[in-house]
Amino acid sequence: MKIGILTSGGDCAGLNPVIRAIGLYLYNNVKNVELVGIPEGYAGLIRGESFPLTCDDLKGLLTLGGTILRTRRTPFKRMTVMEEGGTRLSKMIANYKKMGLDCLFTLGGAGTHKTAALLSMEGCNVIGVPKTIDNDIFGTDVTFGFRTAVEVVTEAFDRIETTTRSHSRIMLVEVMGNKAGWLTLHSGIAAGAHMILIPEIPFNLNAVCSFVDARIAAGETYTMIAVAEGATLDTEAKLKREERTFARSALGESTITRHLAEVIGEHTGQETRHSVLGYLQRGGTPCAFDRLLCTQLGSYAARLAVEGKFGVTAAVLGNKITFNALADVAGKYKFVDPKGEEVAIARGIGISFGDRV
Ligand code: F6P
């Protein structure tokens, strides 16, 4: 049995532990298994590159951040576009066959799943494992990498809070998450943010300023605001995507955080700063929760391969490791429900989402 593994899209903590778990399960349970890594995600498969992954190569991976296979974003929309030598999809299928793979594991997010579903439809045996710090993959309660990122962002927030409190400032902390606000919501609640701005709940400038005014009037000396990369003004939310991008670039920004800090600072007259956490959110060693989850997902996915269950992706549903058909979940996202329990609980303890005056 020859098995390939690739990691695609933005990296996160947990990719290496999943590779390890897949490998350990196969080496422990299958005779004559050959495991290969495909470098740089689908780009490596398009080029037809692979290298052996021996038992020795799996050592030390449980605690190692990033991905030993390296990763890359390979946009789905270009997969079926004709270029020299055929489409990227046809090249991947040809290389899958040339490598003699019996199964390909694709460790990635929503975009990775879309390409995996395409490969599966074309007859390749594919099994996905759901990765992303954004936690936005449809059909799974949690993705690996998310909980580590929540820990990292919460700790960063805690550190920023002590300096903010010392200086009696208003602080906006920008957290990754372009489409979905899970990371901002969970770390914001965990760190005790006073306001949380997420893409799913467009915010209103008056509501944001009134909330900060009310805190100042109540004698509060500082305010912590968690802002998702994809947080959107209510006025922007009404625009088409291209119009919004245009409006943002007119401000010289891709995110709203710096502009919002300026507006709040001018409005309140209080020292206001912002801090963009950036790529530290994706780096470093996986937390214990993710090490366990990655081990469970990886070994479960490997078992699916042994049982010949392909065209699926591993998932967590109600504390159980299970699977979804790639065709059912690919291309779908899981968003924070503005009317859901998590948002209600946050509102209940006085956290503002910047949408209500
Ligand atoms: O992995 C998802 C994500 O972390 C998003 O939250 C973020 O917008 C994006 O990746 C940025 O990734 P890159 O700059 O590596 O493409």
Image (spheres, rainbow, N blue to C red):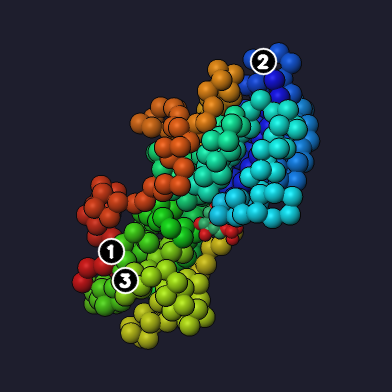
Mark 1: C-beta under 8 Å from nearest atom of ligand 1: no
Q: Earlier in the sequence, mark 1 or mark 2?
A: 2
- Check the image and report above or below for 21 versus 228: above
Label 1 sits on what residue type?
A: Ser
In the rendered image, which residue does mark 2 sit on?
A: 30
SS label for mark 3: loop
Q: Position of residue 98 (x, y in %)?
A: 75, 33
Q: Are marks 3 and 1 in contact (CB under 8 Å)?
A: no
SS label for mark 2: loop
Q: For the N terminus, give its image quadrant.
A: top right
Which mark, residue 216? none
Quadrant location, ligand no. 1: bottom right
Question: How far apart are the alpha carbons under marks 2 and 3?
Answer: 55 Å
Count neighbours of disc 3 (C-alpha within 10 A) and say few if under 14, some if 14 to 19, many if 20 or more: few
Q: Residue at x 26, y 49 (%)?
A: 340
Q: For the C terminus, give its image quadrant.
A: bottom left
In the rendered image, which residue does mark 1 sit on?
A: 352
Q: Earlier in the sequence, mark 3 or mark 1?
A: 3
In the rendered image, which residue does mark 3 sit on?
A: 238
Label 2 sits on what residue type?
A: Val
Count neighbours of disc 2 (C-alpha within 10 A) and say few if under 14, some if 14 to 19, many if 20 or more: few
Q: Residue at x 40, y 52 (%)?
A: 182
SS label for mark 1: loop
